[in-house]
Amino acid sequence: MTDFDVVRRLHAMTGVGWLSEVPPAQPHHLPQLKWTVGKKSELLQVLYTVWPLLGERKQASATRAIRA
């Protein structure tokens, strides 16, 4: 994601995982920020935090992630 401030804020709110910058693959691409969460329990914490903010399709994706 290229909205670094949004990702950093959510990372700070949940306190899980780690952030790393991904350099652009091509000169015309923007740098990206990758958020890695290694434990399912931490993934669930993130999903429960953002759940009320998600639309219907993203909630369905999150439900599939929870069940995996």
Image (cartoon, helix red, strand yellow):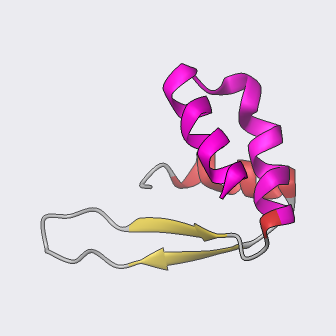
Viewer-closest of 63 and 6: 63
Residue at point 74%, 57% (across, down): 11
Q: Residue at x 81, y 56 (%)?
A: 12
Residue 2 falls in image quadrant = bottom left
Residue at 83% over, 63% down: 42
| Residue 39, x across and y down, in percent | 79, 73
Of residues 21 and 58, the one drawn nearer to the viewer in this rendering:
58
Q: In this view, does 1 lie to the left or right of 55?
A: left
In the displayed structure, would residue 58 be above or below residue 39?
A: above
Residue 9 visible in the shown view: no
Image quadrant assignment for residue 62: top right
State the quadrant of the N terminus.
bottom left
Pinpoint residue 45: horizontal percent, then vertical percent: 85, 52
What's the residue at 78%, 66% (across, down)?
40
Task: Specify the segment rendered in magenta.
Answer: 41-68
Position of residue 59 in the picture relative to residue 66 (left or right)? left
Residue 63 lies left or right of residue 20; in this view the side is right
* Residue 15, magenta (yes or no): no
**In the image, is 35 to the left or to the right of 40?**
left
Main secondary structure type of the part rendered in magenta: helix
Q: Give the quarter of the figure containing the C terminus.
A: bottom right
Residue 37 vertical position relative to residue 1 in the rendered view, above or below: below
Residue at the front extreme, as displayed: 67
Q: Where is residue 61 in the image (x, y as percent from the top left)?
A: 55, 40
Measured as percent of width and height from the top left, residue 56 is found at: 55, 20
